[in-house]
Structure formats: structure tokens, C-alpha cells
Amino acid sequence: MRQVKLGLWGPEISEVCFGSLAISPLQGRVTEEEGMLVLKYALEQGVNWIDTAEIYDNYGQIASVIKAYPDVRIVSKTYAVSAKEMYVSLEKARTALNRDTLDFFLLHEQESALTLKGHSEAWEELLIAKQKGIVRWIGISTHAVAGVRAGALQPGLDVIHPILNYQGLGIIDGNLPDMLEAISFASELGIGIYAMKVFGGGHLTNDPEKAVEFVHRVPGIQAMALGMSSREEVDYNLRLVSGQKIPSELREKVKHRKRKLYVADWCQGCGLCIDACPQGALQLEKIAVVNDKACVLCGYCGRACPHFCLKIV
């Protein structure tokens, strides 16, 4: 597994980060135990960092696996707004992950300078935690061009986790050229950048080589987070990223089936899922209706549903 440096002052990490959303309860692809086995297998193959978030609700799952891998780095994210909320989020992560020091901690889904201003208290608390050695590197995740630009100028920021794929799917403002320009700007400032949704939430899996090669060609992107929920997917993705030939048998096993967001017929039409969707992919027509072209299969809507009506299938 190729090792890369995350920005000017970040650590050496594997080019592939294990995206744990795919094994979390938020997506429900596998059981907790099955997910743990997949994660363990990925670490055995040389992946040495894991992307998670407070909303994924899988700290315990990760903690059980990393007991045997103390050098593995963890990225987590929070929606905390106030200083108190950030403190609680940090302590929750430290306790649940059994780590006195957290590697990376990010503000989740920051859209612009205005969004960051609204989270200023939380950011200040994050800066304090960094100064105290509670967390090593801090940053943001974002689906927005304006988020990347604002993050690049945020005092003390080390890393940005932006959405990026060759069709620009999931960008909530601007377009792909705008995003590439913003990433270039952030990279020139020495910020570490690792991409998310390289396969466009499953929409670009018909040509995975093209999807990975596109991200490889973007200056300033050092790594990418890939969601994997089976050993075969781990083998497939690691071969894909390293440019190795993929055996036809493995390709067949991992052949990506079309996936979609399913809304159950007992939907109450409360609209909470619509507010939770960062892509604007849901609308209310008595019940929730999905725009499949806009949906990136993140599963955040399912977390917000009190009646468990939404699931990725």
C-alpha cells in the first residue's frame, strides 16, 4: 500500500482511508460483527487510517478492532456548534475509542464561511483541544466549493475532506471546475486533502478505473476514503488504487449492483429526512420522494427518520 503525506504538516498515511460509513448502522449493509471482520482485513492489507463520524454511531465497532492495531489513525467528525457540544463530542470519541489523544477531528459538513462562523465556538474549542494535545490535526468535511475555500482560510485548520468525483456529483454549489480550483487553492496553502464519494455514491461504479484515475490526476489530493463492506471489496479497491490488474473472478464478485434509497410505504410524511439531506435529494409529496440523480447514498436521512422508513438497498 503506497504511503503518502497528508499536506505539509500532516502524517504519513496509506493512500486509501477506510470509509467506515459502509459498515456502520447508518447504512446497515452488514452486521456489526461482519463489519468488524472487514475492517480488520483492510488493516491487515496495509490500510492504516479509518474515517468515521459521531453520526455513524460505530465507535464501539472500531474500538474493538483497533485494540490490536494501536498505530492506526482515526478521523472523526461532529456537528457540534457550541464549545460545550464540541467538548462533549471530543470526550465521547476519546472514551468510546479508548484513545487519550485523537488523531483527526473535523467539523462535519461545513458549507461556507457563514457555516463556519456559526460553528465558531466549536472551532475555538477544537483549537484549544489541539493546543492541549487532545487532538493532533483538525479540519472540516464539506460537499461545497465554498466550504473548501472557507476551510482553507480557517485559522489552525490542517485537513479538508471534500466531495470529489469526475462528474461532480454531490457538489451542492458551483460545479466540478469550481471545486477543482478551490482544492488547488487549499493545496497551495499546504492543507492535507483526502477525497470522499470518489464513486459518486455508487453512481460511477460502471467505470471504477476512470473514477480512481480522475482523483489520482487532481493535484493536491493526497488520498481518498473508500467505503468497503466485504473482503472482496477491500481486495478490489486496493488493487484498483494501486493500478494492479484485477482478476476476472474478483471483478465478478464485486460487480456493483445498482443501489438506491428505498422509502417504505409506512412513511408518515414528517419531513425530518428532507432537512437531514445535504444534497436536497428528497422532497415531500405526502410521503418522502427521492431524486435518484441527486442522491449520493450517504444514509443521513435514515438517521433522522423516527419511523425507520428509509434504507439503502
Image (spheres, rainbow, N blue to C red):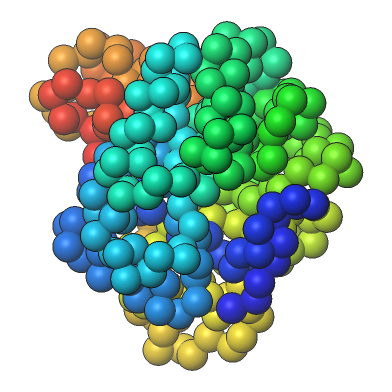
Task: Give the side of residue 89 with respect to residue 279, left or right.
Answer: left
Q: Residue at x 71, y 48 (%)?
A: 192
Q: Quadrant of the N terminus?
A: bottom right
| Residue furthest front as drawn | 132
Left or right of residue 60: residue 160: right
Q: Total label count? A: 0
Front one among 257 and 220: 220
Q: Is residue 289 something one can see in this rendering?
A: no
Q: Position of residue 213 (x, y in %)?
A: 71, 66
Q: Quadrant of residue 305?
A: top left
Pick the front one: 70 or 299: 70
Task: Residue 256: give x, y in percent of width and height.
Answer: 41, 65
Compared with 33, 203 (above or below) is: above
Q: Is residue 308 above or below residue 39?
A: above
Which residue is pictured at 65% across the width and 58% down the height? Answer: 11
Task: Answer left or right for 275 relative to 131.
Answer: left
In front of the other: 283 or 180: 180
* Residue at (32% x, 21% y) in the render: 273
Q: What percent of the width, then of the height, locates residue 86?
A: 44, 22
Q: Is residue 22 visible in this depiction of the protein?
A: yes
Q: Relative to residue 84, is residue 303 depicted above or below?
A: below
Q: Is residue 193 left or right of residue 186?
A: left
Q: x, y percentage for residue 257?
A: 37, 62
Please report the residue visible at 61 percent of the width from the left and 64 percent of the height from the top: 13
